[in-house]
Image (spheres, helix red, strand yellow):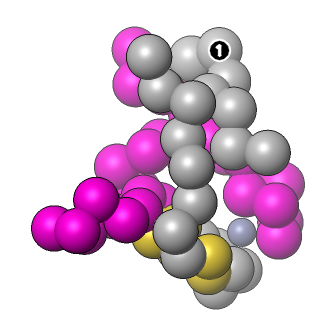
Amino acid sequence: MFEPKAPDVSSEPIVECPGCQRRHTFNQVLTAQSNQNVIFNCPDCGYERKNIHTSKG
Ligand SMILES: [Zn+2]
Protein backbone atom coordinates (compact mmCIF):
# COMPACT_ATOMS: atom_id res chain seq x y z
CA MET A 1 0.00 0.00 0.00
CA PHE A 2 2.16 2.84 1.20
CA GLU A 3 5.37 0.96 1.64
CA PRO A 4 8.43 3.20 1.48
CA LYS A 5 10.41 2.56 -1.68
CA ALA A 6 14.14 2.44 -2.01
CA PRO A 7 15.42 6.00 -2.23
CA ASP A 8 16.55 7.02 -5.68
CA VAL A 9 17.55 10.67 -5.51
CA SER A 10 17.94 11.24 -1.81
CA SER A 11 17.88 9.52 1.52
CA GLU A 12 14.27 10.49 2.07
CA PRO A 13 11.63 7.76 2.06
CA ILE A 14 9.66 7.60 -1.17
CA VAL A 15 6.00 6.84 -1.56
CA GLU A 16 4.30 5.92 -4.81
CA CYS A 17 0.97 7.57 -5.50
CA PRO A 18 -1.83 5.04 -5.99
CA GLY A 19 -3.50 7.47 -8.36
CA CYS A 20 -0.77 8.32 -10.85
CA GLN A 21 2.04 5.96 -9.80
CA ARG A 22 4.48 8.81 -9.55
CA ARG A 23 6.97 8.80 -6.74
CA HIS A 24 7.22 11.53 -4.19
CA THR A 25 9.05 12.03 -0.97
CA PHE A 26 7.00 11.70 2.19
CA ASN A 27 7.38 15.41 2.79
CA GLN A 28 5.78 16.19 -0.55
CA VAL A 29 2.65 14.15 -0.14
CA LEU A 30 2.21 13.28 3.51
CA THR A 31 0.93 15.62 6.17
CA ALA A 32 0.93 14.55 9.79
CA GLN A 33 -1.94 15.89 11.82
CA SER A 34 -1.79 16.77 15.49
CA ASN A 35 -4.09 13.83 16.24
CA GLN A 36 -1.52 11.49 14.66
CA ASN A 37 -3.60 10.97 11.56
CA VAL A 38 -1.67 11.15 8.33
CA ILE A 39 -3.08 12.61 5.14
CA PHE A 40 -1.77 11.65 1.72
CA ASN A 41 -2.24 14.31 -0.93
CA CYS A 42 -0.69 14.04 -4.38
CA PRO A 43 0.32 17.37 -5.99
CA ASP A 44 0.26 15.80 -9.44
CA CYS A 45 -3.10 14.06 -9.73
CA GLY A 46 -4.87 15.34 -6.65
CA TYR A 47 -5.27 11.94 -5.08
CA GLU A 48 -6.17 12.30 -1.44
CA ARG A 49 -6.51 9.78 1.33
CA LYS A 50 -6.88 10.27 5.03
CA ASN A 51 -5.93 8.23 8.04
CA ILE A 52 -3.39 6.15 6.20
CA HIS A 53 -0.94 3.91 7.95
CA THR A 54 2.73 4.19 7.20
CA SER A 55 5.05 1.30 7.77
CA LYS A 56 7.80 3.57 8.94
CA GLY A 57 10.23 1.98 11.34
ZN1 LIG B 1 -0.80 11.15 -7.95
Residue drawn at x 68%, y 80% is 47
Report helix, strand or loop for mark 1. loop
| Magenta span of residues | 11-38
The residue at the far front in this view is: 35
Is residue 20 a member of the stretch shown in magenta? Answer: yes
Question: On the rendered structure, is 21 left or right of 36?
Answer: right
Residue 27 drawn above or below residue 5: below
Residue 44 drawn above or below residue 9: below
Ligand 1 found in image quarter: bottom right
Residue type at tag 1: Ala
Residue drawn at x 47%, y 26% is 56
Residue drawn at x 44%, y 16% is 57
Question: On the rendered structure, is 44 left or right of 57?
Answer: right
Is residue 10 among the parts visible in the rendering?
no
Q: Position of residue 21 (x, y in %)?
A: 83, 54
The residue at the far left in this view is: 34
Closest to the observer: 30 or 45?
Answer: 30
Closest to the observer: 48 or 28?
Answer: 48
Q: Residues within 10 Å of mark 1 (few under 14, many from 20)?
A: few
The quadrant in which residue 46 appears is bottom right
Where does label 1 land, which residue? 6
Is residue 2 a member of the stretch shown in magenta? Answer: no
Some atom of ligand 1 lies within 8 Å of the CB belonging to the residue at label 1: no
Question: On the rendered structure, is 33 left or right of 31?
Answer: left
Question: On the rendered structure, is 20 left or right of 54?
Answer: right
Closest to the observer: 38 or 9?
Answer: 38
Q: Position of residue 1 (x, y in %)?
A: 79, 45
